[in-house]
Every structure is written in C-alpha cells, then in structure tokens.
Amino acid sequence: MPVVENLKLAEKLRNGEATFGTTFYTGSTTAIEVAGNWGLDFAFIDAEHTPVNVDTHMEKLVMSALLSGIAPLIRVRGTNEWDIRKSLEIGATGIIVPQVNTAEQARAIVRAAKFPPYGRRGGDASCRAAGFAGPGFQWSSYMERENANKLVIPMAESFEFFDNIDEILDVEGIDVINFGPADYSISRRISIDYSMSHPEVDEKLSELIEKCHARDIKVMAPCIPPVAESVTALKKKGVDMIIMGNDVMFLNEGNRRAREAIDTSAKA
C-alpha cells in the first residue's frame, strides 16, 4: 500500500514559509478534521498534559489528521525512546518533546527519532511510516525520507534551556524549537502571559529566534490571542510555526458567547 504521510509541512519550512496549526487537548478526531477543513498546516496533539497516550487512540488521531491534509505533531511525555519511535512509526509528521534542559537530553531525542547518520532509531518495516513494507519498499529510501521529513522539535521552556542554549542548538538533527512561555515564566517565577508581553519572555523569544536561525533551525511559538495583529507581530519577529490557540480555548470561547446570549436574553 502507498505510504500515508504529510510532507507539505517540511517542504513549506524548507521554503521559508510561515506555517500555522492548533493544539488539541480533547482527543477528538472531529476537532482535528475540522482544523484540516480550514487549511491549517499542523495539528499539535498533546500527550503530555492529557490522558491521551501513544496508543491505538493516538493512531486514530494521527490518521484523522493525515486524511484531512493536516500534519500531525505529537507532544510526547518526555525523552522516552519508545514513545518517540512509536509516534513516528504510526505516522506522525514530527514529535515535540517537553522540558528539554540540556544538550544530553537533545542528543537522546535525536538518537531516538532519527536514523543514521544523525541517530540510532530502531526500525521495523511493519508500520504505517514504512507503508507496512508494501510494494516497492526499500529500507534506504525509507530511512532517508524519514530523516528528511519527520520533524524533531524540543521545547525551550525553562531558564535551564537558555543557560545551555548554544550547546543544545549545536546538536545535529534538531529541526525546530518550540518556545513555551508559560513554563519558562514558571521557571523564573514571573507572571504567566501567553501574549509574551513580559519583557524577559519577549527577550528570550528573540534570543531563541536569532540563535536558531543562525543554525537553520526553525522556531515555533503560540499566538495568544489568535488574532491578525498577533500573527503579524510573530511573523515579523521571525516565528516560523505559529500555534493558533487550542481546541479547549475554542470550546470555552463558544460557550462564553452562548452564556452571554442566554444572560442577555434573560434581561430582555
């Protein structure tokens, strides 16, 4: 059978295009398909803060994304080798790894996610990423395609990351760094603000962009609120992958409007 995958995201990033996605916390295939209908580039599927694991339900989420034309990125629980490998084998376009503080952790992630010469990812052809070893399967082209198009995305979300930023970014095989302003702020005991208006948070994002782009590494960051002015500001700043909110946020916003309508009607 043909390999079911999404190569458009990696191609857009290589071409220097801005890309856009949404985070999914609810484990809903419907929510992912709706995002695909609206032409978003990636689905950031969370398995760190939710009950969702890298299991058969995650496989359904990944397939929903692929069949909807949106690239699935799985945020795994940490540097666990099996979570990383299995995420990629079930068809994820990339893995996002939280709480990366050292170059040693970054090397472990690349080792698990990339085939040689970058890493030592274990291989098995009986998986979706390999087309289940169907007609025309070749190990060499499979490993080359995976290395070129599957994104390795550590998260920069602590002061320790920035203490070790040069050593981390010098690890070969990193494709993107995802900036996490909330956890960074928690690590520094400063006010949490996803709009990144705090001067220190803004400064760290700028530092990350400068150092990543000098190494041809892309940068991902949240856009909160997900409005045109915020998108424009992040693009001008140099953010390559922009996270346009999340499914829980959209549910809250829709229900807030419903509650306002109910309350306003009650006063009429």
Image (cartoon, rainbow, N blue to C red):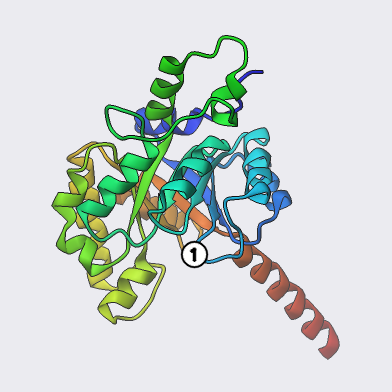
Question: Toward which corner of the image does residue 90 lie, by quadrant?
Answer: top right
On screen, 107 above or below 90?
below
On screen, 88 above or below 254?
above
Which residue in the protein does label 1 denote? Answer: 225
Question: Toward which corner of the image does residue 160 lie, by quadrant?
Answer: bottom left
Q: Position of residue 150 (x, y in %)?
A: 43, 34
Q: Is residue 176 visible?
A: no
Which residue lies at the image location 34% right of the left edge and 47% below the top edge?
A: 109
Along the horizontal axis of the image, is 149 left or right of 70? Answer: left
On screen, 111 above or below 49?
above
- For the C terminus, give its image quadrant: bottom right
Which residue lies at the image location 63% right of the left edge and 18% below the top edge?
A: 2
Question: Toward which corner of the image does residue 113 lie, by quadrant?
Answer: top left
Along the horizontal axis of the image, is 144 left or right of 27? Answer: left
- For the N terminus, give its image quadrant: top right
Count residues near mark 1 (Cα–Cα under 10 Å), then give few for <14, some for 14-19, many for 20+: some
Which residue lies at the image location 62% right of the left edge and 66% below the top edge?
A: 248
